Amino acid sequence: MHGTEVVVTGLGAITPLGGDVESTWKALLAGESGIRGGVLRGHEDTGLPDVVAGTMATDPAESLLPAQARRLDRSQQAALTAAAEAWADAGAPEVDPDRLASAIGTGIGGVRTLLEQDDVLEEAGTRRVSPRTVPMLMPNAAAALISIEYGARAGVYTPVSACSSGAEAIALGARLIRAGEADVVIAGGTEAAIAPITVAGFAQAQALSRYTAEPASASRPFAADRSGFVLGEGAAVVVLESAEHADARGARVHAVLAGAGIAADAHHITAPAADGSGQISAMRKALAQAGLAPERISHVNAHATGTPVGDVAEAHAIGKVFGRATVTAPKAALGHLFGAAGAIEALIAVLSVEHGVIPPTRNLAAAGIGPDIDLDVVTERRDAPQEAVLSNSFGFGGQNVSLVFTGARHRASRTVSTTP
């Protein structure tokens, strides 16, 4: 490991599986699904088939004051909800505001606000458009609102990197700490973009799962009969700290963010490079920064969206780095949360190393694992010590991010409680 040690001291989430970290984690370990049907009722005139998606298990507006909720896009509501849980879980650390930063990634920002206010403009005219439209739709608003809420003056950052946005925000947070620019960073991702236009666009690209009759089985990463991904929404936030700052205040440490790797395919706007070069590079960079050989990784939390091409490309890349690795694919239960996906899956990786368990991958019983997938895909909860977990997040544009988390119990020369 190189430079300042970065630790995770706070976790927060709102997902299709639960309204907080505990409920999400319990549902994931139990093999439950957060995918629901009929999510675009009232839009039948669009010609869309019955849409299944991973809508948030609870309404994020309910955790906010009504007046505040009305001023926020749903993606911003989710980000603030997850941040509040993470900050409380970290013990509301006392930190110099000039040493506290915010980094929240998103794939698209407040698209629902944009669409809704455009409808208002067309139907009722300019004077009926909300004066809050721009701050509600701008992608950087979630990071800015969290900065305002917690007084973070070391910087506000908003990676907009498609499906790798949340993971990139966490990697950026670690960089800020290692560079000496911050002691604490509130980092993660948020997305709430389930709308007719996004569904229609992905449907036209033939990227969505065709298994809409049974929503819970629609998302099938690594399955022989996989046909596409399932849209999801939600947010996940982690509190990152320098180990020195966390130890000085006696903070509980969930895990160590030991390494982060970022690489680009420079190949195609939507398709991954056939040779997996960018994905392989991101994983190897993360391992190098963590100072770990591939065999030290207990399992890989795969990006695995359930598309025929994408899953094969990732399986090939993982095989190049690790051989026949043990992997899990949370999108089978959560759907694809786009800008929030890398953050929630990083959070799951943290919980895996903290509690010594690999969550199961749903929906592989019927057709089995694809013959083109040479991986040990975990289909039932597997309890075993997890020394280190690598989490992958890959996005349109050839943007690849890999994060390596190690257990707090492995920290050299420090004793920090890991009691859940």
Image: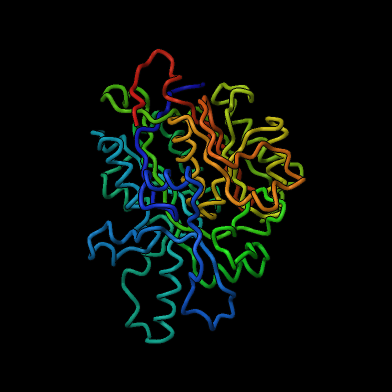
x, y percent for residue 80: 32, 52
- Look at the picture and state if 277 lies above or below 224: above
- Look at the picture and state if 137 lies above or below 234: below
Closer to the camera, 69 or 299?
299
- Asked if residue 64 can be seen in this view, the reply is yes
Q: Residue at 56% of width from left, 73% of height from top? A: 50
- Give the image quarter of residue 135: bottom left
From the viewer's perspective, tell me whether residue 269 is left or right of residue 86. right
x, y percent for residue 197: 54, 72
Q: Residue at 73% of width from left, 48% of height from top? A: 370
Q: Residue at 76% of width from left, 45% of height from top? A: 372
Most extreme residue toward the front is 366
Most extreme residue toward the bottom is 124
Closer to the camera, 229 or 32?
32
- Give the image quarter of residue 238: top left
Closer to the camera, 264 or 283?
283
Q: Quadrant of the C terminus?
A: top left
From the viewer's perspective, tell me whether residue 418 is left or right of residue 324. left
x, y percent for residue 365: 64, 49
- Asked if residue 179 can be seen in this view, the reply is no
